[in-house]
Protein backbone atom coordinates (compact mmCIF):
# COMPACT_ATOMS: atom_id res chain seq x y z
CA UNK A 1 0.00 0.00 0.00
CA UNK A 2 1.18 3.50 -0.81
CA UNK A 3 -0.18 6.63 0.86
CA UNK A 4 0.47 9.91 -0.96
CA UNK A 5 -0.34 13.12 0.91
CA UNK A 6 -1.02 16.36 -0.95
CA UNK A 7 -0.73 19.17 1.57
CA UNK A 8 0.64 22.65 2.19
CA UNK A 9 2.42 21.32 5.29
CA UNK A 10 4.19 18.02 4.57
CA UNK A 11 6.58 18.56 7.48
CA UNK A 12 3.82 18.19 10.07
CA UNK A 13 2.75 14.84 8.61
CA UNK A 14 6.06 13.02 8.13
CA UNK A 15 6.76 12.64 11.85
CA UNK A 16 3.68 10.46 12.35
CA UNK A 17 5.43 7.60 10.55
CA UNK A 18 8.69 7.80 12.47
CA UNK A 19 7.68 5.55 15.39
CA UNK A 20 5.68 2.51 16.45
CA UNK A 21 3.51 0.27 14.26
CA UNK A 22 3.50 2.39 11.09
CA UNK A 23 7.28 2.80 11.16
CA UNK A 24 7.65 -0.99 11.34
CA UNK A 25 5.16 -1.41 8.50
CA UNK A 26 7.33 0.85 6.33
CA UNK A 27 10.48 -1.04 7.32
CA UNK A 28 8.81 -4.34 6.37
CA UNK A 29 7.79 -2.95 2.99
CA UNK A 30 4.06 -3.16 3.74
CA UNK A 31 3.56 0.57 3.53
CA UNK A 32 5.04 3.44 1.52
CA UNK A 33 4.49 7.15 2.02
CA UNK A 34 5.00 10.20 -0.18
CA UNK A 35 4.46 13.83 0.76
CA UNK A 36 3.76 16.45 -1.89
CA UNK A 37 3.48 20.20 -1.30
CA UNK A 38 0.96 21.33 -3.87
CA UNK A 39 2.17 24.92 -3.45
CA UNK A 40 5.11 23.86 -5.63
CA UNK A 41 2.68 23.42 -8.52
CA UNK A 42 1.28 26.94 -8.33
CA UNK A 43 1.74 29.00 -11.47
CA UNK A 44 1.46 32.21 -9.49
CA UNK A 45 4.73 34.14 -9.33
CA UNK A 46 4.49 34.20 -5.52
CA UNK A 47 3.34 30.56 -5.27
CA UNK A 48 -0.06 31.62 -3.96
CA UNK A 49 -2.67 28.86 -3.80
CA UNK A 50 -5.62 30.75 -2.32
CA UNK A 51 -8.06 33.36 -3.58
CA UNK A 52 -11.17 35.15 -2.26
CA UNK A 53 -14.45 33.33 -2.76
CA UNK A 54 -16.44 34.17 -5.85
CA UNK A 55 -19.59 35.94 -4.74
CA UNK A 56 -18.06 37.06 -1.46
CA UNK A 57 -17.82 35.44 1.95
CA UNK A 58 -15.33 35.15 4.77
CA UNK A 59 -11.93 33.55 4.30
CA UNK A 60 -9.88 32.37 1.35
CA UNK A 61 -10.43 29.34 -0.86
CA UNK A 62 -7.85 26.96 -2.33
CA UNK A 63 -7.61 27.43 -6.09
CA UNK A 64 -8.03 24.36 -8.31
CA UNK A 65 -4.95 24.57 -10.58
CA UNK A 66 -2.14 23.68 -8.11
CA UNK A 67 -4.14 20.81 -6.64
CA UNK A 68 -5.13 19.43 -10.03
CA UNK A 69 -1.55 19.53 -11.31
CA UNK A 70 -0.24 17.93 -8.11
CA UNK A 71 -2.75 15.08 -8.41
CA UNK A 72 -1.84 14.51 -12.05
CA UNK A 73 1.84 14.35 -11.13
CA UNK A 74 1.38 11.46 -8.67
CA UNK A 75 -1.75 9.69 -9.89
CA UNK A 76 -1.24 6.20 -11.23
CA UNK A 77 -3.62 3.78 -12.93
CA UNK A 78 -4.87 2.28 -9.66
CA UNK A 79 -4.73 5.42 -7.53
CA UNK A 80 -7.73 6.31 -5.36
CA UNK A 81 -8.09 10.03 -4.60
CA UNK A 82 -9.65 11.11 -1.29
CA UNK A 83 -10.43 14.72 -0.38
CA UNK A 84 -10.88 15.68 3.28
CA UNK A 85 -13.65 18.11 4.19
CA UNK A 86 -16.23 18.49 7.00
CA UNK A 87 -18.90 18.42 4.28
CA UNK A 88 -18.00 14.88 3.16
CA UNK A 89 -19.32 11.43 4.04
CA UNK A 90 -18.41 10.40 7.57
CA UNK A 91 -15.51 7.93 7.55
CA UNK A 92 -16.06 4.65 9.44
CA UNK A 93 -14.49 1.25 10.09
CA UNK A 94 -16.14 -0.33 7.06
CA UNK A 95 -14.48 2.29 4.89
CA UNK A 96 -11.12 1.57 6.55
CA UNK A 97 -11.37 -2.15 5.83
CA UNK A 98 -12.54 -1.59 2.25
CA UNK A 99 -9.81 0.93 1.47
CA UNK A 100 -7.13 -1.36 2.95
CA UNK A 101 -7.50 -3.39 -0.26
CA UNK A 102 -6.40 -0.47 -2.44
CA UNK A 103 -2.83 -0.21 -3.74
CA UNK A 104 -2.38 3.54 -3.82
CA UNK A 105 -4.41 6.18 -1.97
CA UNK A 106 -3.89 9.90 -2.50
CA UNK A 107 -5.12 12.10 0.36
CA UNK A 108 -5.76 15.75 -0.51
CA UNK A 109 -5.77 17.89 2.65
CA UNK A 110 -7.64 21.16 2.63
CA UNK A 111 -6.77 24.47 4.31
CA UNK A 112 -8.37 27.89 4.76
CA UNK A 113 -12.05 27.69 3.78
CA UNK A 114 -11.61 24.52 1.74
CA UNK A 115 -11.45 23.69 -1.96
CA UNK A 116 -12.82 25.21 -5.12
CA UNK A 117 -15.61 22.68 -5.69
CA UNK A 118 -14.60 22.12 -9.31
CA UNK A 119 -11.36 20.34 -8.37
CA UNK A 120 -13.30 18.05 -6.02
CA UNK A 121 -15.86 17.19 -8.69
CA UNK A 122 -13.14 16.57 -11.28
CA UNK A 123 -10.62 14.52 -9.31
CA UNK A 124 -12.15 13.03 -6.14
CA UNK A 125 -12.99 9.35 -5.98
CA UNK A 126 -14.34 9.85 -2.47
CA UNK A 127 -14.84 12.78 -0.09
CA UNK A 128 -14.62 12.09 3.63
CA UNK A 129 -15.13 13.81 6.97
CA UNK A 130 -13.91 12.29 10.25
CA UNK A 131 -16.66 13.93 12.30
CA UNK A 132 -19.08 16.80 12.67
CA UNK A 133 -16.52 19.44 13.62
CA UNK A 134 -14.11 21.74 11.80
CA UNK A 135 -10.31 21.46 11.92
CA UNK A 136 -7.68 24.03 10.97
CA UNK A 137 -6.68 21.80 8.08
CA UNK A 138 -7.24 18.38 6.58
CA UNK A 139 -3.85 16.94 7.53
CA UNK A 140 -5.07 15.40 10.79
CA UNK A 141 -8.10 13.94 9.03
CA UNK A 142 -5.85 12.38 6.39
CA UNK A 143 -3.61 10.86 9.06
CA UNK A 144 -6.58 9.55 11.05
CA UNK A 145 -7.99 7.79 8.01
CA UNK A 146 -4.66 6.39 6.84
CA UNK A 147 -3.91 5.06 10.34
CA UNK A 148 -7.28 3.29 10.44
CA UNK A 149 -6.73 1.90 6.94
CA UNK A 150 -3.13 0.80 7.53
CA UNK A 151 -3.90 -1.34 10.57
CA UNK A 152 -6.29 -3.39 8.41
CA UNK A 153 -3.52 -4.26 5.94
CA UNK A 154 -2.37 -7.84 6.46
CA UNK A 155 0.87 -7.99 8.42
CA UNK A 156 0.81 -4.44 9.79
CA UNK A 157 -0.40 -5.45 13.26
CA UNK A 158 1.80 -7.86 15.20
CA UNK A 159 -1.24 -9.87 16.27
CA UNK A 160 -4.06 -9.78 13.73
CA UNK A 161 -6.47 -11.23 16.31
CA UNK A 162 -6.46 -7.70 17.74
CA UNK A 163 -8.80 -6.74 14.91
CA UNK A 164 -11.43 -9.31 15.84
CA UNK A 165 -12.63 -7.83 19.14
CA UNK A 166 -12.22 -4.15 18.29
CA UNK A 167 -14.97 -1.57 18.30
CA UNK A 168 -17.35 -1.55 15.32
CA UNK A 169 -16.86 -5.24 14.54
CA UNK A 170 -20.28 -6.93 14.47
CA UNK A 171 -21.84 -3.49 14.89
CA UNK A 172 -20.80 -3.12 18.55
CA UNK A 173 -18.32 -1.04 20.49
CA UNK A 174 -15.49 -2.99 22.08
CA UNK A 175 -16.20 -4.41 25.54
CA UNK A 176 -14.31 -3.00 28.55
CA UNK A 177 -10.95 -4.69 29.19
CA UNK A 178 -8.93 -5.21 32.39
CA UNK A 179 -5.46 -6.15 33.56
CA UNK A 180 -3.73 -6.78 36.90
CA UNK A 181 -3.81 -5.79 39.72
CA UNK A 182 -7.10 -7.54 40.45
CA UNK A 183 -8.13 -4.68 42.75
CA UNK A 184 -7.41 -1.02 42.01
CA UNK A 185 -8.64 1.83 44.20
CA UNK A 186 -11.48 -0.28 45.56
CA UNK A 187 -12.65 -1.60 42.19
CA UNK A 188 -12.15 -5.24 41.17
CA UNK A 189 -11.91 -7.05 37.84
CA UNK A 190 -15.19 -8.93 37.19
CA UNK A 191 -14.69 -12.40 38.64
CA UNK A 192 -15.66 -14.23 35.42
CA UNK A 193 -12.47 -12.91 33.78
CA UNK A 194 -10.39 -14.76 36.36
CA UNK A 195 -11.94 -18.23 36.22
CA UNK A 196 -10.68 -19.41 32.83
CA UNK A 197 -14.11 -20.35 31.45
CA UNK A 198 -13.76 -18.93 27.94
CA UNK A 199 -17.39 -19.48 27.00
CA UNK A 200 -18.57 -17.44 29.98
CA UNK A 201 -15.91 -14.81 29.36
CA UNK A 202 -17.07 -14.45 25.75
CA UNK A 203 -20.70 -14.19 26.84
CA UNK A 204 -19.81 -11.53 29.40
CA UNK A 205 -17.80 -9.55 26.85
CA UNK A 206 -20.70 -9.66 24.40
CA UNK A 207 -23.10 -8.46 27.09
CA UNK A 208 -20.79 -5.64 28.15
CA UNK A 209 -20.21 -4.61 24.52
CA UNK A 210 -23.97 -4.44 23.96
CA UNK A 211 -24.50 -2.34 27.09
CA UNK A 212 -21.67 0.03 26.15
CA UNK A 213 -23.05 0.39 22.63
CA UNK A 214 -26.54 1.14 23.93
CA UNK A 215 -25.12 3.81 26.23
CA UNK A 216 -22.76 5.58 23.82
CA UNK A 217 -24.60 4.90 20.54
CA UNK A 218 -28.29 4.90 21.51
Image (cartoon, rainbow, N blue to C red):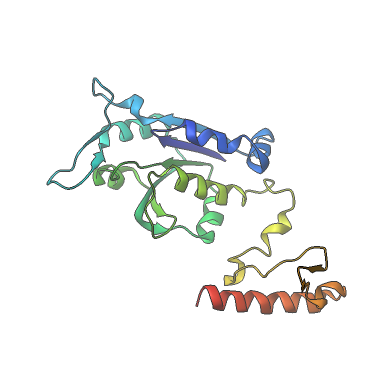
Q: Residue furthest top?
A: 45
- In screen coordinates, is 164 left or right of 14? right
In which quarter of the view is residue 190 placed?
A: bottom right
Residue reaching furthest left? 55
- Can residue 205 be seen by looking at this rendering? yes
Q: Is residue 35 above or below residue 186?
A: above
The structure residue drawn at horizontal position 25% and vertical position 46%, both measured from the top left corner, is 117
In x, y percent, where is residue 92? Answer: 50, 60
Place residue 131 in its image quadrant: bottom left
Please tell me which residue is depicted at 68% across the width and 65% down the height of the picture: 165
In percent of width and height, residue 62 lies at 27, 38
Q: Nearer the viewer, residue 91 or 181?
A: 181
* Residue at 61% from the left image edge and 79% from the top image edge: 211
Q: Which residue reaches farthest front?
A: 185
**Mark count:** 0
Left or right side of 203 for 35: left
- Residue toward you, 8 or 149: 8
Residue 100 is at least partly visible in this image: no
Image vertical order of residue 177 relative to residue 109, above or below: below
Lateral position of residue 55 relative to residue 214, left or right:
left
- Across and down, in percent, residue 195 comes to 87, 75
- Where in the figure is residue 1, as x and y percent of width and height? 57, 41
Residue at (50%, 32%) from the top-left corner? 34
Amino acid sequence: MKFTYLTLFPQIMRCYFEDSILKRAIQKGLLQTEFVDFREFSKDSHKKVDRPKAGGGAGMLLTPQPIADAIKSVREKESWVIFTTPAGKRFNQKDAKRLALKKNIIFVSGRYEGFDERVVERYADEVFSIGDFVLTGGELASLVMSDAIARNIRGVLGNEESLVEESFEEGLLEAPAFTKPIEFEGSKIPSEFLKGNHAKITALKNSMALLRTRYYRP
